[in-house]
Amino acid sequence: MSRKGSTGGRKKELGRRTRETEIVVKLDLDGSGTYKCDIPDEFLRHMVETLARYSGADIEIAAKGDIAHHLIEDVAIALGKTFREALGETTVQRIGSAVVPMDDALVQVSVDLIDRPFVHIEVPNLMYEHFLRSFAMELKATVHTVVLRGKDEHHIVEATFKALGLALKEAMARSGKTMSTKSKVEWRKA
């Protein structure tokens, strides 16, 4: 995938407001994994912080919403879109994969930062399956998660976010060449 162009920082700030939620995201893909998360849902906050730490991206987010479902979904949408826009036209490695153990859980996540979004998610929590699907669709990426083993739901979800972060870090790494046999895809008006 060709994302050639800017050699500067890959940063983006994006706000999203609906009748149900209000979210502001500041993202630096070339950061050090720092985070500042003002999210009322404690587990969601923990997962966003985990994503920041393991992806190496600096994430600052303020989010509020009426119910957990809307908040989780809209944070995922806002994060996915912000990651996508921060990538810009930088040429990146494109593909990344990671396997993460966490106590009883062992999870694999593979990503392809390509304009063909596809998602296969295995997590034992419907809300976090929805989060990962919404995030991937806004990122316009292919994302596969596989639970290799595990029983504790918290451990499986957290290992998934850690593996996602590591896979994204690998996929978002700058590359000196276009990682596709199709070369650069160009969009133009018909």
Image (cartoon, rainbow, N blue to C red):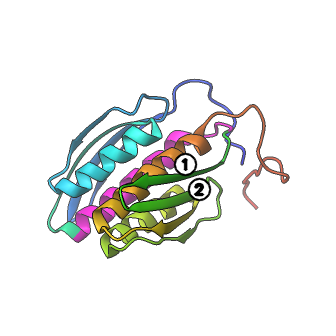
Judge the density around disc 2: few (<14), some (14-19), many (≥20) Cα neighbours within 10 Å. Answer: many
Left or right, 54 with reference to 176 = left
Q: Is residue 84 magenta?
A: yes
Q: What main secondary structure does the magenta stretch of the protein show?
A: helix
**Which amino acid is tagged 1?**
Ala
Q: Which mark is residue 167?
A: 1
Alpha carbon distance from label 2 to label 1: 6 Å
Rendering coords of residue 136 (x, y %): 50, 61
Quick check: 138 above or below 45? below
Judge the density around disc 1: few (<14), some (14-19), many (≥20) Cα neighbours within 10 Å. Answer: many
Confirm or deny contact between disc 2 and disc 1 (CB under 8 A).
yes
Q: Earlier in the sequence, mark 2 or mark 1?
A: 2
Left or right, 63 with reference to 162 = left
How many marks can you see?
2
Q: Residue at x 40, y 62 (%)?
A: 105
Q: Foreground residue, 159 or 140?
A: 159
**SS class, disc 1:** helix
Q: Residue at x 53, y 41 (%)?
A: 169
Q: Foreground residue, 150 or 17?
A: 150
Quick check: 150 above or below 172? below
Q: Residue at x 28, y 45 (%)?
A: 24
**SS class, disc 2:** strand
Observer able to see residue 113: yes
Q: Is residue 93 magenta?
A: no
Rendering coords of residue 177 (x, y %): 78, 36
Rendering coords of residue 186 (x, y %): 75, 50
The magenta stretch is: 69-91
The residue most toward the top is: 8
Observer able to see residue 81: no
Q: Which residue is mark 2?
A: 111
Q: Foreground residue, 103 or 169?
A: 103
Q: Which mark is residue 69?
A: none
